[in-house]
Image (spheres, coloured by chain):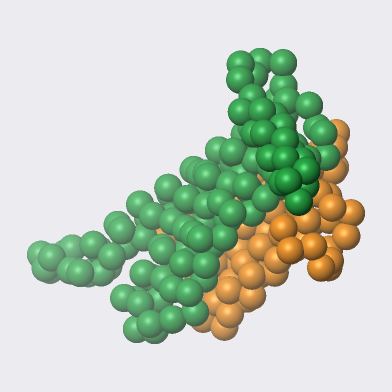
Chain colours: A green, B orange
Amino acid sequence: MRNSWREGRFSIEILVDILIILLISTGVLFSAVTALGLIRLPDVYTRTHAASKSSTLGVLSILLGTFVHFWFNEGIFNTQMVIAIAFLFITQPVAGHLIGRAAYMTGIKVAEETVRDDMGPAIEKRKNNQQEELENE
Amino acid sequence: MIMFYWIALMIVSFSFAGLLFRLVKGPTVADRVVALDAIGVTLVSIVALLSLIIETEFFLEVILLMSILSFIGTAAFAKFLERGEIFDRDPR
């Protein structure tokens, strides 16, 4: 890398290294934000919010950086990495949603700062609809 | 470049320690499951950074396996918390 600077060539390796550094820096930053959110936020729903969104972006950036490194520097096109990136991108928000729903169903209270709760009326409505269906039958 | 990878691994490990704190302390079970999910994801990034440092591509198979196991574990835990059992015949 240092030699190509001295010779005055504009090397593709430097561009790839800059790309990798940018991607991995973003990923590390978002991983740190995830830990900060899980420690500091007040209740389980806001923690789900931190753990699903920012951790997804963080791990996605780090995996993309690794993928680019192995593709351009080592010449290995690893298809398992592509599958893992797509899989994490799809399933991680779904997992956050599942935990939040299970937490609400088990009756965990929301934090005091919460201003509105849409899930309670929705559950009431669904229960009423089911009772009406039973009575019609 | 290798120094940059080491520093990145260090910061990610610190965030891993923060998630462990929430896993131990978490007042409810759902908090612990959220922390466990985030720990699985952070473990995936640690494995990716380790494979960059050691310069081997054999760790990359671990990444896919670990992400799948993390999601299945989280989904099973969520269903167990909600209904009290994991396998049932309720079509809902």
At 44% from the left and 73% from the top, the residue drawn is A82
Residue B75, percent across and down? Answer: 72, 59
Left or right: where A135 falls relative to B44: right
Instruction: Decide if residue A40 is in sight here.
Output: no
Q: Quadrant of residue B69?
A: bottom right
Tell which of A122 and A53 is nearer to you.
Answer: A122
Vertical placement of residue A53 versus A41, above or below: below
At 41% from the left and 71% from the top, the residue drawn is A67
Tell which of B44 and A131 is nearer to you.
Answer: A131
- In the picture as drawn, the residue positioned furthest to the left comes out as A8
Instruction: Decide if residue A108 is in sight here.
Output: yes
Tell which of A74 and B38 is nearer to you.
Answer: B38
Residue B45, percent across and down? Answer: 57, 60
Left or right: where A8 falls relative to B52: left
Quarter of the image for the N terminus of chain A: give it: bottom left
- In the picture as drawn, the residue positioned furthest to the front comes out as A136
At 46% from the left and 67% from the top, the residue drawn is A86
Vertical placement of residue B91 versus A47, above or below: below
Numbered circles on residues, count: 0
